[in-house]
Amino acid sequence: MNIQKRLTILTTDEINQLYSRPLFTTKERVQYFALSQMETELLYTLRSIKSKIYFILQLGYFKSKHLFFQFNLCEVKEDIQYILKVHFNSTDFSDFGSIDKKTRLNQQQLILKRFNYCLCDSQSRLDLKEQARRAAAISGKPIFIFRELINYLTTKRIIIPGYSFIQEVIGNAITYEQKRLIRIIQKQLSETDKQHLKELLYNPSGLYKITRIKHEPKDFSMNEIKREIEYGKEMYPLFQLANSILPQLKISNESIKYYASLVEYYSVYKLKRFNESLINLYLLCFIFYRYQRMNDNLINSFIYKMRKYNDDILSFAKDQVYNYYTENQEDFKKVGNVLQVIIDENISEHTVFKDIQRRVFSILDRPKLTELANQILNTSKIDEKAFRWERIDALALQFKRQIRPIFMTIDFVTTDIEDPLMDAIHFLKEVLMKRKTLLKYDIEDIPQTFIQNGTKRYLYTKDDAHSKRLLIDRYEFLIYHSLWHRLQSGDIFCRDSIKYRSFEDDLVDEDTWVHKENMIQDFNLTKLQQPIEQHLKELENKLEARIISINKRITSGKNKYVQVKKHKNHHSWTLPYTRASSLINHSFFDVLPQVDMRSILYFVNQQCNFLDNFEHILGRYANQKAKDYTLIPCLIAWGTNMGLYRMGEVSDIDFSKLATTSANFIRLETLKDANDCISNATSQLPIFPYFNIDDFIHSSSDGQKYETQIHTLQSRHSSKYFGMNKGITSYTMVANHIPIQARIIGANEHESHYVFDILYNNTTNIKPTIHSTDTHGTNEVNFAILDLFGYQFAPRYKDIQATISRNLYGFQHPSHYEKLLIKPVRKINTDLIVKEWDNIKRIMVSLALKTTTQNVIVRKLSSYARKNQTKRALWEYDNIIKSLYFLEYIDSLSLRQNVQKSLNRGESYHKLRRSVSYANFGKLRFKTEQDQHIWNECSRLLSNCIVYYNASILSNLLIKSKDTGIVMKILQYISPIAWQHINFYGRYEFSKSPTVVNIEEILESINKDDILTSLTREDSLEE
C-alpha cells in the first residue's frame, strides 16, 4: 500500500492548535507576559515602545508554544492593553502598524538565545528524517511517529518546522520502512513459502483458513481449548518461518502487533488487493503474534484450571476436617466419661478389671474406643494434607482430561539447566507422547528429585510385597501444581509467548543496548542521564529533611489534621479519611432544554469534524465516504449497548445499511482517532483551563465493571460484582473531566499493571503531570516508573496510617528515628540500587521502546513470586519515591483534596458511562473481545461528545460572564459531567435533517435569573 504524498496525520483543529498563535485568557497573560530579570534586561536593549511591546508579545507566545508567529499589532489589541498596563504604566499607544522584518528577526534571535533554542536548519532536518525512520521501525502509525518527532525536537530544543514538512518526513519514513521490509521479505521467502502463505487466503471448504485461525477461544471450556490447540498445530510451520524472518526485519514487537492487527481489520477480499509482499509481511506478523497469543491462551487456561482445582482441593480438605470434628465431638465427650470411670473414687480397689471394662464399653463400644485411642496416640491434630491428596485422587480423571492436552502442547523452558522439575516435565511428556503409563516404569527411572521431603509421605505406598510404590496420579498432579507456581514466579516460561516468556526476552536486546545513552536521551529520560550516586544523594537529602520537618509540624501543632494519641509507652497517630462524594448532574443543566443524542453528535462534529477520522477500511482505494446519517446511528447503537440489529428496529435506517457502514468504517483505530479529536477539541475550549486542579492537569484512572452475557476470554468471574456470572473491566483515564484514554481488561486483572500503560500511551494533546488512582492502582513499581518518566504518582490510600507504618523508609537505620512519631521502618538499600542501576535503565528504555506490551513488564516487575536482584533494586527505588509521597500526603491538605477531587471526577464519569450504556440493562452481549473493545470506544465517544457539549455551554457563559453578571470563578466548580438534559431513548429518525444546536440561542432563551440561581447552588458545586 503506497503512502499518499501528503499523509493526513492531524485534523484541521489539531493543526491550528499546534501552529496557530495562542489566544490567551487573563490568567494566561499573567503567566506568559511576566518578565524575568534577564528578560527585562533584554527588553531595555530595545529602543521604541513599539519594539518593546512586540518583543514581549513574541516572547510570551514563544513561552507558550515554542514557535514564532507573524502577526499585526492590530490583531492582538487585548494582549497589548495588558502589556501596557503591567509593564508601561498604561502608557498611551496608538501605533498599530506593521513591524519591520529585520526587527522581528533580531528579536527572535534574542529569544532563541534566551531559551537555548535553535531553528530547524538543514542538519536538523536530516537528523529529523533519521529519527522518523527509527520511529517507523517501532510503530508504523503516523501519529506515533509524529509524536516521537515532536518529543525529539522539544528535547533538542529545536523549533518545530512547518506541518507540510513533517507530513513529508513521516510519509517518506513510512514509505522507506515499507520498502525496506518488502526487500527483506522478497529476499527471504521462497516460492514454496509464498504458496503456503497464499493458502491462508484460499477457501476450498467455504471458509478461509485465515478466518478460522482469527477466532480465539471464547472461554476455557474443553471444546474451545481443543480447537485452539488444533489451530496451533496448523500455524506451527508458518510460525517457524515467521520466527526465522521477522528478527531480520529489526522491527519492534509493537510494530509486529500493529501489522498483525491489519489482518484482523481487513477482510480477505481487501487483503488480496494489497501488494503481495506487503500481504506476506502482514501474514507473517499475524501468524507470529497469533501463535504467541495461542500459547498465552493455553497457559492462561492452564493457570485458571489449576487455580480452580487448588480451590476445590483446599475447600474439600477444610470440609473434611470440619466434618471430622463435628462427627467425633460426641464421641470425644464420651472419652471424658470413660476417664471419669477410671478415676472414680467410689470404685473399690478390689473391683475386677473386667467389671470396669464392662462399664467402660457401655459408654463406648470396644471398636469405637480403639479407634479414638489410636487417633489420640498417633496424631496431635487431623492431617488436612491427607484429605487434599484424597481429593486429588478423586479428580484424577478430570485433571488428566483437561490439563494433559495443554501440558503436551506448550514448550516449557527455564534458564536453569539443572532444574529437577524440568527433568520431571520432560519425562512425563515423553511418557504421554508414547501413550504409555507411569506404571510401566521402574520407580528408580522416574525423576523424583523435585519432590519436597514434606510431600513424599503422600506420594508413596507399599504394594503387596511391601515394596515402595509411587502413586502415579498424585505424582502427575504434583508436576502440574509445581509448574503452575513456577510459571507465576517466572522461573519457568514459554519463549513463544507474550505474557509468559522470560523477563530477559521482554527487554531491549544486548546489541541495541550498546547505544543506551543515545536512547535515554532520545526518550528524554532525564533522571536516567544523571549519575545514580548523585541522584540518590539528592533524594536522601530531600527525604531526610522531610522526615524531620513533617514530625516537627505535627508536634508543634502546625499540622492540625494529624491526630496524636498518647499511650502508656508510646504515641500513635491517625489522619481522618474523608471521602467526598462525586458530583454529577449540576443543577444548572436542569434549566436547559432537552436534546437528543443524535443532535449532540451532529453539533460536536460541526465543531471539530471528528467523523472525518472514520476512513474507509480500504483507505484511499475507496472513493466512498461515510455518510453521517448512517455512521452516527452505528456509533449510538454500539455505544449505548443497543446493537445494530435493535437500532435497525427503532430507527429509519435498516440493519443491512448499518452493518455495512459499521464493517467499513468503525474500527478501533478510527474510533481512537475520533475520540482523540473530540478530547483535543474540548481542551481548546475557554473553560478547559478552569478545570485544572491547582493549575495542573491532574488525571486519574480507575476500572468500571460490566457484566457480559456472552463469554469471551477476558470475561472472568467476580462474585463481588457479577455474582455467579462473568464480566470485564473498562479501565479509563480521565483528565479535567475528559476520558482521554480507555481499554478493556479482565475483571480479575490487577489495575495497577495498566497505570503506566494507559498514561504513557495517551495520544491526545492533553498531557497530565500528576496522576491518581485508588489503592487498586498501586504496586511495588509504579512510583518508580512514573517518577523516571516524569510523572508524579499520587494515589489515594484509605488506611494511610497502616500503610505508612509498614512502608515508610529512610536512608538511616530505624534506630536513628526512634524518638520520632512518624518514622521509617527500614533503611533503603542504596548499594543494591547502584549495583542494578544499568539494568533498571534497560527496563525503562524497554518500556519506552515498547519491546513488549508494557503492562506485561509491569506485571512481572510487581509480582511477589519473582525473585530477581534487579526487581528488588527497582522496588527499593520505588520505596524512596513512595516515602516522599507519603510524607507530602500527610503534610498537605491541598494534596489530599486534589487527589480526592481527581478521583471523584473519574467516578462521575463512570456514572455517565453507565447511563450511556443503558440498553440490555447494561449487560454486554458482544460475541468477541474485538466487539467489546469497539463498544468501549463507542461508549467513550458518546460520553466524550456529552462532555464537549456541556463544556461548550460553560465556555459560552465564561465568554459572556461580564455581560451576564456570572462570577467567573463559579464556573470552574461546575462539572460538565451531566446528562439530565439529554434524551437517550425513543425512536430515531436519521434520514431527516438533525436539529441544529445553537448554544447562544439556547442560553438566550433561558431566564438570566434562573441561570444565576442554578449556578450558585452550593450543593451542586464541585468540591
Image (tube, rainbow, N blue to C red):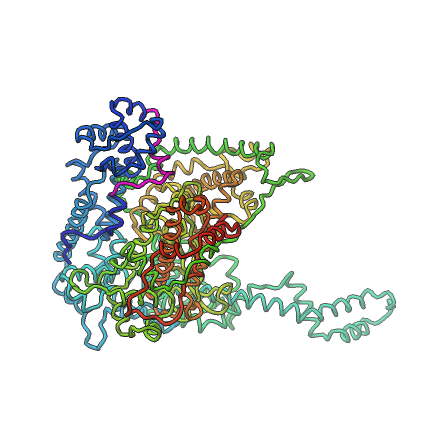
Q: Position of residue 895 (x, y in %)?
A: 49, 42
Q: Position of residue 846 (x, y in %)?
A: 31, 46
Tell me if residue 622 comes above or below residue 15 in the rendering: below
| Magenta span contains residue 24 | yes
Q: How many marks?
A: 0
Residue visible at 68% across and 64% down in the picture: 376
- Compare residues 1023 and 328 and report the one nearer the observer: 1023
Residue 780 in sight here: no
Asked if the magenta segment contains residue 226, the reply would be no
- Location of residue 814 (image quadrant): top right
Quarter of the image holding residue 116? top left
Relative to the observer, which residue lies in front, 821 or 690? 690
> Taking the image as drawn, is residue 829 in sight?
yes
Magenta residues span 20-38
* Point 45% across, 44% down: residue: 967
Q: Nearer the viewer, residue 227 or 334?
A: 227
The spot of residue 268 in percent (x, y) is 20, 68
Which quarter of the rendering shows the N terminus?
Answer: bottom left
Q: Position of residue 802 (x, y in %)?
A: 56, 46
Q: Nearer the viewer, residue 115 or 1009?
A: 1009
Left or right of residue 122, residue 459 in this image? right
Q: Residue at x 27, y 27 (%)?
A: 52
